[in-house]
Amino acid sequence: MTEQNSPKSEIVEADIRIGGRSIHFSAQVSNQPVQPYEMLPLFQNITNKVIEIGIDEVVAKGKQISCRSGCGACCSQLVPVSKAEAYALIGLIDEMPSAKQAEVRARFSQSMERLHDVGLLDELDRVIIDGDKDKLRAIGLAYFNLNLPCPFLENQSCSIHPDRPLSCREFLVVSDPAHCAKPDPETVESVVLPKRVSAILYAMCESKNNTGKGFLPLIQILANTVSLQNEQSPPEPAIDLLNRFLNKLAG
Ligand code: SF4
């Protein structure tokens, strides 16, 4: 990685091998202390590049991505978001016009009430802390079966598309979209990406004493507003954050 200095910012250049391809990154980064959520536009851009590699690989095998605008079939899944993204999404909701904000907040509350009523909320917290993959898969299926569309889904489209979480960007399928209405690994063929950038961000958002996970379900972000504010990592120079991220990406 090379860095060129100026008083207020640094240009970071990096060549990273991902999925057998070399990707060149170039970004002008402030040398002021920042929190991870302030770096999200950059992390989102890098995620998009990794996804392009994944798409090229499936296309080279003669397959096509079947996800289309207006198909929100996968938007009733239990979507994980990093704590940095959760914090940024809360800010996004806060900045919405009041009528729209009220609608979105109401959708979050209705889904949370339903989760509480069916006894899934406590179970969700336990399973996330436990980290058992089989239990996570089972609770993900139970959540999907409740048919709770994401509060940001409007007319079967993502109303926050440019700001959508990394995990939403990373979920792409090559199978018939009709199968996404009933997720089953037998029928839904999702694209295996050469790197899951979302997981890198979850790790970066873990609390330093390792007592807390770096992610939570999107549906729980508003209910965790105060703790998310308190748990944001202390600011550190943007260049350090980016280098940490790129090292994990290259690792
Ligand atoms: S954030 Fe957007 S893409 Fe992600 S689940 Fe919600 S509506 Fe779908």
Image (cartoon, grey):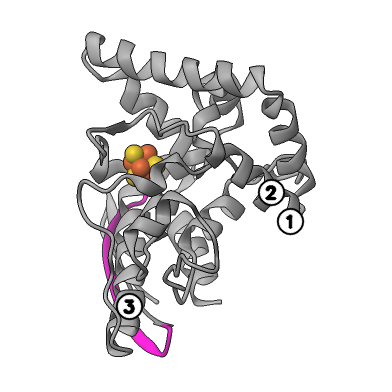
Crowd rating for badge 1 (residues with CA inside 10 Å; few <14, some 14–19, many 20+): few
Q: Secondary structure at mark 3?
A: helix
Q: Are dots 3 and 1 in contact, CB under 8 Å?
A: no
- From the top left corner, tell me how far across and down residue 84 is, in percent: 48, 40
Residue that carries the numbered disc 1 in the rendered image: 134
- For residue 20, above or below residue 99: below
Residue 206 or residue 133, whichever sits in front: 133
x and y percent of residue 176 in the render? 33, 65
Q: Secondary structure at mark 1?
A: helix
- The residue singled out by tag 3 in the image is 53
Q: Is residue 225 above or below residue 245?
A: above
Q: From where the camera sits, is residue 233 visible? A: no
Image point (34%, 84%), residue name? 57
In the figure, 102 relative to 184: above or below? above
Answer yes or no: do the residues labelled 2 and 1 have beta carbons within 8 Å?
A: yes
Q: Residues within 10 Å of mark 2 (few under 14, many from 20)?
A: few
Q: Answer whether residue 156 is visible to the viewer in this image.
A: yes
Residue at horizontal 26 percent and vertical 39 percent from the top:
156
Give the magenta range.
Answer: 18-31
Which of the numbered marks, if any, corresponds to residue 138? 2
